Image: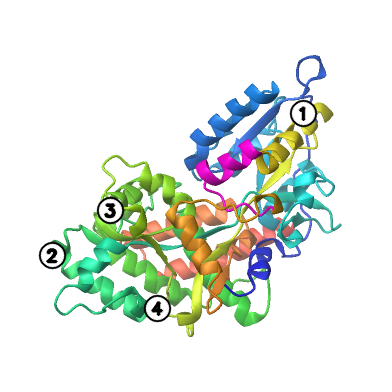
Amino acid sequence: MKNLKRIVALAAAATLAVGSLAACGNDQGGADGEGSVYFLNWKPESEETYGEIAKKYTEETGVEVKVVTAASGTYESTLQAEMTKSDAPTLFQINGPVGLMSWQDYAADLTDTAFAKDLSDPGLALKGSDGKVYGVPLAVEGFGIIYNDAIMRDYFALDGAKAASMDEINNFAKLKEVADDMQARKADLGIDGAFAATSLATGEAWRYQTHLFNTSLYYEYQADGITDTDALKWTFNEEFKNIFDLYLTDSTVEKTLAPSKTVTDSMAEFATGKAAFVQNGNWAWSQISGVEGNTVAEEDIKFLPIYTGHQGEEKMGINVGTEAFMAVNKEASEADQKATIDFINWLFSNETGMKYVTEDLGFIAPFKAFGDNTPSDPLAKEINRYISNPDLTAVPWVFGTMPSSKFKDDFAQLLAQYASGNVEWSAVVDGVVENWATEKASIGG
């Protein structure tokens, strides 16, 4: 895939004004000055694996590692609450440049750490205005429309199918034509809908207010030749609406039920063969494989780009980037900071740690130590397939420039109101544009 380094680095490239949260001093030294690790985890789907990693590391080193996982959609508020405690996290995660603005005063300089120096591309690091490294990515990830190839083959075999193979589905018009036909013939295919339910329950809308929004946001930045803005125009909101409407109408459930649905609901529908498509990222493999009654074979799990009707999208790949940057709490004791850095080095350079990263977490790790060692799960393989395709250009992750968690929450509420039929699309657009400006101004202040 073209320009991968530039694409991934874009997620952390925006130059932003400083507006920091005041730091609080914490005395976090372990017993007798021995360091310990407290990791506040970003991804609920990785909670069990991180627990196993912590146990293994303690067994090997004797160093205590505590892992606490924030509930979906609550990381920022959880982090704010935890950082005020005497036993605050020593290892936390920053959501790109905007996150660094809030947490700069807590983030230790990682420039000279072994794991920062081992990045396969130094441009992936999250740097401050002083050029120093304050965050290092956990993984390179990707998201798009996941599809069940077995269901698609069944559809292509039907008389009058709107396409003969997935190769023909390379733009929104064709995707809609196929999805609409599949929805009309869902009984013939043994499915409840073309797309799994759109999850718009509180805290569950991140696939849309962040990930789906990323595509239209990137196109606006690209059209205007910028990497951030204080005055969003949402130029390509109709393209967002195209695919969002398709998700809602060609679904396993009536669109008015979307505000009650969770990501778990959606992934279970896909895993049990009730839907052919679902939007999510490579991290969803565990959500699919772990569902009781899973009927989808590994070889049938594939990615499709998120087509929206954008000109030239036939040459577009999936969304590729990095969001969660590891940061070490500089307000922690020196012993705890050292213990935390040692833990990160072990996870991304020790043979045991790296095995957990690739096989259990399923991360495509951006470190030289991993070489060609990448996860074997089907979605990770699909990302590698897209990345290695020289004819496709990825959509980089630029949603790190979104102004705040409040902006995302308000956006999600607007989408839920729209799905329920309570507001027109114009109200969603007006709300998103106005809230963006308000939240950006608040950060600037």
Q: Mark 3 points at which residue?
A: 257
Along the viewing direction, whichever of 121 and 418 lies nearer the viewer: 121
Q: Residue at x 77, y 50 (%)?
A: 116
Above-or-below relation of 158 to 331: below
Q: Are marks 4 and 3 in contact (CB under 8 Å)?
A: no
Q: Name the residue under label 1.
A: 336
Which disc is residue 170 wearing?
A: 4
Question: Which is more N-terminal, label 2 or label 1?
Answer: 2
| Distance CA(mark 1)–CA(mark 4) | 50 Å
Q: What residue type is labelled 4?
A: Asn
Q: Distance between the residues labelled 3 and 1?
A: 47 Å
Residue 211 at x, y percent in the picture: 50, 61
Q: Is mark 2 on a helix, strand or loop?
A: helix
Give the camera-side residue of 240 and 117.
117
Q: Which amino acid does label 1 sit on?
A: Asp
Q: What residue type is labelled 2?
A: Asp
**Which of these two is toward me, 344 or 254?**
344
Q: Which of marks 2 and 4 is nearer the N terminus?
A: 4
**Is 304 placed left or right of 176 in the picture?**
right
- Residue at x-position 69% and y-position 43%: 349
Kindly check if marks 3 and 1 are in contact, taking CB atoms under 8 A apart as contact: no
Of the two numbered discs 3 and 2 in the rendering, the one whose residue sits closer to the viewer: 2
Percent from the top left, x then y, of residue 84? Answer: 70, 31
Q: Earlier along the polypeptide chain: callout 3 or callout 2? A: 2
Residue 355 in picture, x, y percent from top left: 58, 41
- State the CA–CA distance, disc 3 to disc 2: 24 Å
